[in-house]
Amino acid sequence: MSRAAHRLVAVAAMVVALGAAAADKGWASLRGEALSRAFADQDLGDGVHFAYQFGADGELRGMNMGKAAQGRWRVSGNRLCWRWAKSREPEECHEVRRQGQAVRLFMDGQEVLSGNLAPLAGQRPAL
């Protein structure tokens, strides 16, 4: 590969990295106890495809593409983890970034889910 091609690849990589950093501006990573507080007694949904209710006791209920599901959730270190009761899939664990009530969930550095948090019916807003 020529020097010019190497420079072009380096410039392209920098542009991608700067774009990703700009996209995350204003988003804070949630960790540990702050992550538990943010999700306890909250509903996470996108208004169309899914709605997951995170009980303070670790119970997880939800609707995903019109199908009801139940499971358990927990915080492990700095990741939000859950497992659906009838699923053969292993527990999923996500890094979480928040901006106001909007949250983005990541696995292995890739965004896999985004939505908004809202208090469960009859609950006070999380602080």
Image (cartoon, helix red, strand yellow):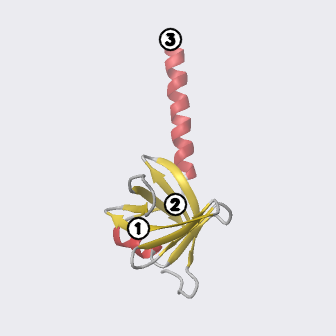
Task: Report x, y in % for residue 82.
Answer: 42, 62
Numbered label tally: 3
Mark 1 neighbour density, 10 Å: few (under 14) some (14–19) many (20 or more): many
Q: In this view of the protein, can residue 116 be seen by the observer?
A: no
In the picture, the disc for residue 2 is 3
**What residue is shown at x 44% (from left), y 50% (from top)?**
107
The quadrant in which residue 103 appears is bottom right
> Of the residues shown, which amino acid type is indicated by label 2?
Trp
**What residue is shown at x 64% (from left), y 63% (from top)?**
66
Task: Report x, y in % for residue 15.
Answer: 56, 36
Mark 3 neighbour density, 10 Å: few (under 14) some (14–19) many (20 or more): few
Q: Nearer the viewer, mark 3 or mark 1?
A: 1
Image: 50 above or below 13: below
Q: Is residue 99 left or right of residue 65?
A: left
Q: CA distance from mark 1 to mark 2?
A: 23 Å
> Of the residues shown, which amino acid type is indicated by label 1?
Trp
Mark 2 neighbour density, 10 Å: few (under 14) some (14–19) many (20 or more): some
**What residue is shown at x 51% (from left), y 32% (from top)?**
13
Q: CA distance from mark 3 to mark 1?
A: 52 Å
> Of the residues shown, which amino acid type is indicated by label 3?
Ser
What secondary structure is marked by label 1? strand
Question: Does the residue at mark 2 contact the one at mark 3 (Cβ under 8 Å)?
Answer: no
Q: Which residue is mark 1?
A: 73
Q: In this view of the protein, can residue 80 be seen by the observer?
A: yes
**Dot placed on the residue nearer the N-terminal end, 3 or 1:** 3
**Dot placed on the residue nearer the N-terminal end, 1 or 2:** 2
What secondary structure is marked by label 3? loop
Residue nearest the observer in this picture, 126 or 91: 91
**What residue is shown at x 55% (from left), y 79% (from top)?**
119
Residue nearest the observer in this picture, 110 or 91: 91
Q: Which residue is mark 2?
A: 27
